[in-house]
Each structure stands twice: as structure tokens, then as C-alpha cells.
Image (cartoon, coloured by chain):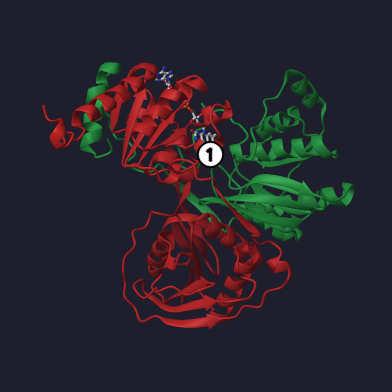
Chain colours: A red, B green
Amino acid sequence: MVLVLVEHADGKAIDPSLQTLTAARSFGEAVHGLLIGSSVDLSAHGVAVAHVAQHASLDSFAPDAWAAIIVQLADRLKARAIFAAGTDRGNEVMARVAARMQLPLATNCTAVATGSPVTLTRQRWGGSLLEESALHSPRPLVTVAPHTVAIALYPAATTVEEFTPQLTEQELAVKVLERVSNKGGGVSLAEAKVVVSGGRGVGSKEGFAIIEDLASLLGGAVGCSRVVTSAGWRPHSDQVGQTGTKVSPELYIACGISGATQHMAGCRGAKRILAINADAEAPIMQNADYAVVGDLKEIVPAISAELRKSRAVHAPLPGPLPEGERG
Amino acid sequence: MVLAADSMSLETRHLGFTISPHEECGVEEAVRLIEASGGESVVLTLGPIEAAEQLRDAMAIGIDRAIHLQTDGGEWDPESTAAAIVDAVGAEESASGPFDLIFFGNESADAGGFQVGLRVARGLGRPAVTGVKKVTVEGTSVRCEQEVDGGRDVYVVPMPAVVTVKEGLNLPRYPSVPGRMRAGRKPVAVSAPARTQARLELERLVVPAGQGRRAELLGSGPSAAPAVVEMMRRIGVA
Ligand SMILES: Cc1cc2nc3c(=O)[nH]c(=O)nc-3n(C[C@H](O)[C@H](O)[C@H](O)COP(=O)(O)OP(=O)(O)OC[C@H]3O[C@@H](n4cnc5c(N)ncnc54)[C@H](O)[C@@H]3O)c2cc1C
């Protein structure tokens, strides 16, 4: 059997974990799921047994404790391999498992095939490059890159079993004490339907006024390149890319951004990309769906003006005037 | 991205090298902590002879000295890398006392293994917090804020500790000319650790297919605005 750590939120398994269950089935063995804290329904995803780990100290995330639980359960079940989603938590917990078990770990895999050795493909450079590797290990440890494997439903009769781990004080020393929520201000970059992003071509902090205006007209969020955050024009929370936020809007508008691979790693998930750039040969042109060539300082305000104009024309006609006011 | 002829590495002849963004923030944070509370900071890298330049860059912004674990340039897997760092830190600490904090980048920019810092923490028997975007030393503990969806998770762990950091932790400074001059005189301890056989064995690099979309030109200059708005209406965002 293979064991899969299944992360869940609001009573549902998260999609990257369901994608991981699909990937784990390719090993051709029974799939067991591990849920920490509470149970969720996994019967549509080929899970033979769902193990629910419960412990008084698991009220908040404690990565060493999660790793200890995985090690204890995998040893008891003699799991052949252990999988988790390549989320921040999945990668963190599996790295701690690997360090404890003194085994190699392959993170962010996009394909895995059983065998000896296990052969796999994994992401480098935030997905801009792939690596084909052989994993020589008595117990392969694998995380699956989010949104690279499609969820395939596979109904199964899932039994649910409780698991009570033994946790030491040391394993509970690293634990979330408090969650500070972001101050609600505008549309979140990661979830925006439209992202208007500015790069070096915007020229200055003040230059972002036209980017903000277009973003707010479209109900979208403002993004930027690393050159912009390094210059202090925008906070790092606006940065799109490998070391910034990954976005997946309907439309990504890249204004004065050249299209470096590390930037594209953050916006490759966009349905469509519009590049506005003075250089018709900029690399972004090979990665965009639409392009406008020229000075963004003229083009962006012109688009905003056109949007305002077309809204005035398309705006719903005023209703019939009340009786007394008719001419 | 362009691969070398054997597809085992990137073609770097026309590229420059730099400290990666996460690690750059780790270096900056170390310098700030020492500026604020005194003490000594050390930068360590495992890499080829050319990586000495990045060690100088770190010393130019204020790091006191460097440890260079020199390799022949071939790629090291995360297990061997962590083992070499555990040995080097162990030797250093038995000579000059323990490091209160060891910073790592959360993941390397190239191989992206997400594990070296955690393996070293385990090897040294220290608590570790990952993905940190704010660090505050509070007496003998360190408070770490980790970025999560919709907010930040707060951890407080006793020192000595390992903290893996992400870009955004701070805004790294640029080295000054006097800083560069001073860096030239700061000590670098060089050694050549032995590499063990990689159990995660790289066979080949592949550039993913299907990235090249050829952009449809909507026009040039501000006169393209109507075509842009028309496209926005068509795809349902305007
Ligand atoms: C490990 C690593 C991680 C990185 N992570 C990220 C990341 O997360 N995000 C990120 O963005 N970068 C990242 N980078 C940096 C990346 O490699 C590029 O340096 C950066 O994306 C370039 O930003 P830019 O496109 O704004 O600037 P440039 O590359 O300088 O491009 C500016 C563009 O603006 C155009 N332009 C100039 N003036 C105008 C004008 N008036 N009108 C229209 N167009 C104009 C130019 O033609 C050019 O194409 C990373 C780098 C490394 C090494």
C-alpha cells in the first residue's frame, strides 16, 4: 500500500491533495489516506482506508508533529511509498519526514512511475524547467506539483480508522501560536480575475497611478515585476513570479515587463496574457496571446479612457420618467 | 531556457551569477540583526570556485566572514548538501561557539528541493520554521511569521534555531564601494567536502513544451485601445 497525506480545509480535501491521490494510484497498490484532525469523505478518490489522526495538541499546525504522525503510521502500515501535495505544508512536512527517515525526497513531481528505481519528472525554476530523475529509495517519498495532474475519480468503499499518535514535547515545540489575517484591502492578487502588472517600463512609483486606475476599472488587482519591488516602487506582496505570488486570472496585462522566465513562472496559469511593450521583440511576446506595441504611458490611459467611454455607451438606459416629469 | 549539450545543466556561458532572492534576504536579515544587537555573522555556501564572488557580495553588505565548501561544479543533491553543511557548522561551532540563528532560503531557485534547511535542522537537533517573512528576536527566542493563504502564521521557538526565509522578508541593500573594499580583506575559510552518491539522481533536464504562444498584435500606440477593449468584452472581463 501507499500512504498519502491529505490536507483539508472547511470539511473538504484541497484539490492538490486530490490530484496527489490520483498520482499515487499509478503505483498500482492500495491507497491509504492520512487526515490530520478530522475526517473528510475520500470515497470518490480510490482510498481504501482513511486514517484520521487525533491528538489533543493538534488544534493548530505543528509540522514536526505531522511528520512524526506520518512516520509512525507508515511504519505501522509498512507503507511502500509516501505521497503529499507539493503545497507549502506538504513540502515542509515531507522534508521533515525525509530528514527523520534519512531518505531522499523528490518534491514537486509532475509524473511518477513505480519501479526500482522509481522514475519521475519534477519541476525546477518554479516550473520553467523540468528534470527527469531516478529515485533510489527503499521507501520513495514524493510530493506532487499542484495543478499538474488532473483529478481522476475512482469510487471505492473507504473505511475510516482512528489513529492516536504518540507525540513528544519536542515534536510539539514548533507550532502555530496565532493566525494573523491580512487586512482586507481590495482584490487578492492570487484570486483576481484580472491582474494589471507593471515592470521597469512603468518608470517610477508615481507611474503606477495609471496601472491602478486600469486595475480598478476592471475590478482587478495590481501586480508587478521584481525590478519594481527591488526599487521600492511597490511592496513585495504585489510581486508576481517564482519568488512572488502565482496568479491565474482570466486576463493578465503585462505593462513594461520583458517576460523573464522567473516572472513567467508566476503568470503561466493566466488564461490569457496581453503584453504592452515598447519592444516588439521582447521575450514576453513569445508568451502572450495579445500584444500592443508602444509606450505604456500613452497606451494604458487610452485603454482606461476607452473603457469609460464604452461603458457610458453600453450603460443601461434610464427607466421611464415618473408621470409628473414628462415633457 | 537553453540547455548545455548533455542536457544535464543550463547553458550558462552567457549568464551571470547572483545570490538568489530568498538567500539575499537571509543575508540582509543577518546583517540587520547583528547591527541591532551586536555579535558576529558568517555566510556559508556550497558551490564552485566562482561562488567566492557571491560570498564577497554578502561580506560587502556587512557579513563578517565566510565559509566556502568548494565543489568541482557538478550538482549536489539535497542529502549530500545538507550533510556537508551539518559537518561544517559542527566544526565551526566546536571552535567558536553556537550560532543562535541559521538562515536558509526556503527553497533553492534552480533545483527547488524545499529541504536542505530542514535536513540541517534535524542534523543539528534544532527547531526550524519555514517560509518566514518576518523575524523578531525576543530574548532567547525568535518569533517568526510564515506567509499562508490569507494571512500569516506566527511561531515562537527557542534559539538556537533554523529559519528558512522568503523574499519579502526585507528589502536588501546594495553594497557600497567602501563595503566592497572591506569585503576584500575579510577572511574566507575554504574546504572541499566529499560528496556521497545521490539517491535522487538527475538523468536529464527538459524544457517544457508548449510555452511559446505567438501574440496576436492588437495594434501600436494608444490607437490600439478600441481593439483592446473589444478583446476584453469578447473574453468577458470588461
Ligand atoms: C532566482 C530568481 C528569481 C526571480 N524571481 C522573480 C519574480 O518572482 N518575479 C519577477 O518579476 N522577476 C523575478 N526575477 C527577476 C527576473 O529575472 C527579471 O530580472 C525581472 O522579471 C525583470 O523585470 P522587468 O520585466 O520589469 O524589467 P526588464 O527586464 O528590464 O524589462 C522592462 C521592459 O519594459 C519595456 N519598456 C520600457 N519602457 C517602456 C515603456 N515606456 N512602455 C512600454 N514598455 C516599456 C522594455 O521594452 C522591457 O521589455 C527573478 C530572478 C532570479 C534570478
Where's residue A129, x and y in %?
Answer: 44, 43
Q: In this view, does B197 lie above or below A60?
A: above
Q: Is residue B137 above or below residue B128?
A: above
- Using residue B175 as the reference point, say whether residue B34 is left or right of it: right
- Using residue B116 as the reference point, say whether residue B238 is left or right of it: left
Q: Mark 1 points at which residue?
A: A237
Secondary structure of the residue carrying numbered label 1:
helix
> What residue is rendered at 72% in x and 50% in y?
B85
Corner quadrant of residue B216: top left
> What residue is rendered at 61% in x and 40% in y?
B22
Question: Residue lying furthest front in this view?
Answer: A324
Chain to which mark 1 belongs: A
Where's residue A247, x and y in %?
Answer: 42, 43
Q: In this view, does A148 lie above or below B166?
A: below
- Using residue B102 as the reference point, say whether residue B153 is left or right of it: left
- Using residue A15 as the reference point, say whether residue B230 is left or right of it: left
- Residue B70 can be seen in this image: no
Corner quadrant of residue B199: bottom right
Q: B124 or B170: nearer the eye?
A: B170
Amino acid beneath label 1: Ser
Where's residue A40, x and y in %?
Answer: 43, 73
Q: Is disc 1 surrounded by few (<14), some (14 to 19) or many (20+) residues within 10 Å? A: some
